Image: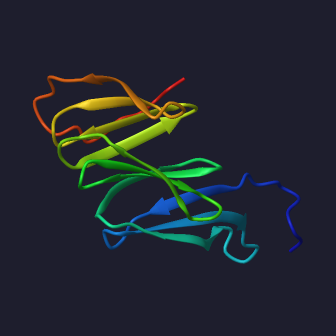
Amino acid sequence: MGHSEEVFRYDALAESRDERRIIVRELGKKSEFTDKRLLCPQLELTDDSPVNCVALNDEEVISGNSNGMIKIWNRMSGKRKESLTSHTGSIQCISFQNNLIVVGGVDKTVRVWDRVSESELFSLQGHETTVEQVMIKK
């Protein structure tokens, strides 16, 4: 059996296992033995409050925390770049694309942030329960 010439796109996976640690793993090439992608540990971030949700791109990791804070980390160095106060309660979900960050929380709101100016653009209120999912779509 020979090697495949197929080219695989490299992606990453971010997870939070014990509340305050975020682990970012690169998804590597498929193994020739198992035909599954290999998970390679890359970066471990430790926060001062429990992490509920994580989103990432090529340059940054953004976490939503139980204290209502958005934390922005440099994905390569692991250093925290910014902290934004967002919700009055715990953040439950987060998504970001280009310069927009969207978060939802137990305070029953969705808040939209401008990543560059680090300011809240607007909030969507009136949800009857905790906002558990948000998504940005082009």
- How many numbered marks have been drawn onto this rendered protein structure? 0
Figure check: 53 above or below 38: above
Residue displayed at 22% across by 37% down: 131
> Left or right of 111: which side holds 95?
right
Q: Nearer the viewer, residue 103 or 40?
A: 103
Rendered-image quadrant of the C terminus: top right
Query: Whole-percent x and y of residue 20?
Result: 34, 69
Query: Whole-percent x and y of residue 117?
Result: 50, 30
View extreme (bottom): residue: 33
Query: Whole-percent x and y of residue 137?
Result: 49, 26
Colour mapping used in the image: rainbow
The answer to which quarter of the image holds residue 10 is bottom right
Query: Whole-percent x and y of residue 51?
Result: 33, 60
Figure check: 68 above or below 97: below
Rendered-image quadrant of the N terminus: bottom right
The answer to which quarter of the image holds residue 78 is bottom right
> Left or right of 61: which side holds 93?
left
Residue displayed at 50% across by 34% down: 115
Residue displayed at 70% across by 65% down: 28
Figure check: 29 above or below 60: below
View extreme (left): residue: 128
Residue displayed at 46% across by 30% down: 136
